[in-house]
Amino acid sequence: MRNDDQADYPQIRTVGLSGLIISFSNRLEDAYNRAALALRAAVSDAAIPGVLETSTSLASVYVRFDSQQSTHAALTAQLSQLLADRDWTQAPLPKGRRFWRVPTVYGGDLAPQLAEAADLAGMSEQAAIDALGAARVRVLTIGFAPGQPYLGPLGPEWNIPRQTALTPMVPRGALVQAVSQFVLFTASTPTGWRHVGQTGLHGFQPTSDTPFTLRAGDEMQFFPVSKAEFLRLCEQDPNLGGAQVSEVEA
């Protein structure tokens, strides 16, 4: 059953001369992200003539097509039929997703804003480490910077606001937190999110055959390790910082 503010969804809208966006909501909830991931996989599996590219945001799917092979109207009709096939918010997540376990230092000089985030969430630093380190989150979307994942959802206690001012710079591999999500930074950059953990995982490796380490739909756990263990793992494994990956069981 959809809420009243969901009555107009899903929506299909045009984007430029050769694109469409299918939106399931104007807000982030697990069900709408699940729907976007499942629909994108279904569009790819359907091999619709003229479709060149698909991608997902937090609650939408983008489809780019060859305007010599299809039109906005024709593709809208095909996507409308696909949307009517099922309740996409209840669809299973696509196959081929992976589970990443990532060694993470929480707090201290490597992640100095953990205490502030924990206080805003109403818990001690150790309780925050326990909670964040146990959370299993999903790559909701890749965006803002090359290969950079938005991860969640975290529990409602972590629906803390962004900062009112920018942190001048956080390093690559910084795990930052706000509005019930993590972001794992793929490059050094300023941010308004709080730096709560530090990883050695490089989400963007431009010289690799697969420059984006993560994919939308992957699952992740950022388990706590000591600073000494973290530095040892980064020295041994400069690109992944000791991260381990396996296939997600269906």
Image (cartoon, grey):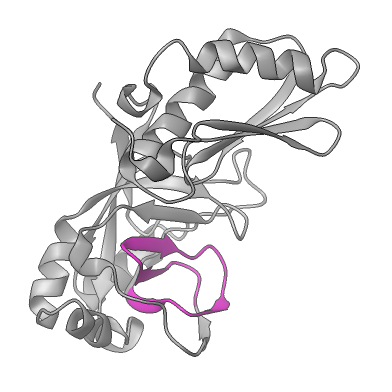
Give above or below for 14 relative to 102. Answer: above
Residue at the extreme right of the image, as rendered: 68
Q: Quadrant of residue 233?
A: bottom left
Residue 225 visible here:
yes
Which residue does the image show at 68% across and 19% down from the upper left?
A: 76
Would you say residue 182 sits in the magenta stretch? yes
Give above or below for 57 relative to 108. Answer: above
Q: Is 105 on the left or on the right of 84, as rendered?
A: left
Residue at the extreme front of the image, as rendered: 4
The residue nearer to you, when weighing 205 against 60, is 60
Region rendered in magenta? 171-196
Would you say residue 115 sits in the magenta stretch? no
Q: Quadrant of the N terminus?
A: top left
Q: Is 94 on the left or on the right of 45, as rendered?
A: left
| Coordinates of residue 48 in the picture (x, y in percent) | 67, 10
| Coordinates of residue 212 in the picture (x, y in percent) | 56, 46
Q: Quadrant of residue 187?
A: bottom right
Which residue does the image show at 56% across and 75% down from the upper left?
A: 188
Give above or below for 105 relative to 249. Answer: below
Which residue does the image show at 26% across and 72% down from the upper left?
A: 105
| Coordinates of residue 121 in the picture (x, y in percent) | 19, 76
| Coordinates of residue 97 in the picture (x, y in percent) | 38, 30
The residue nearer to you, when weighing 103 against 30, is 30
Give above or below for 3 relative to 50. Answer: below
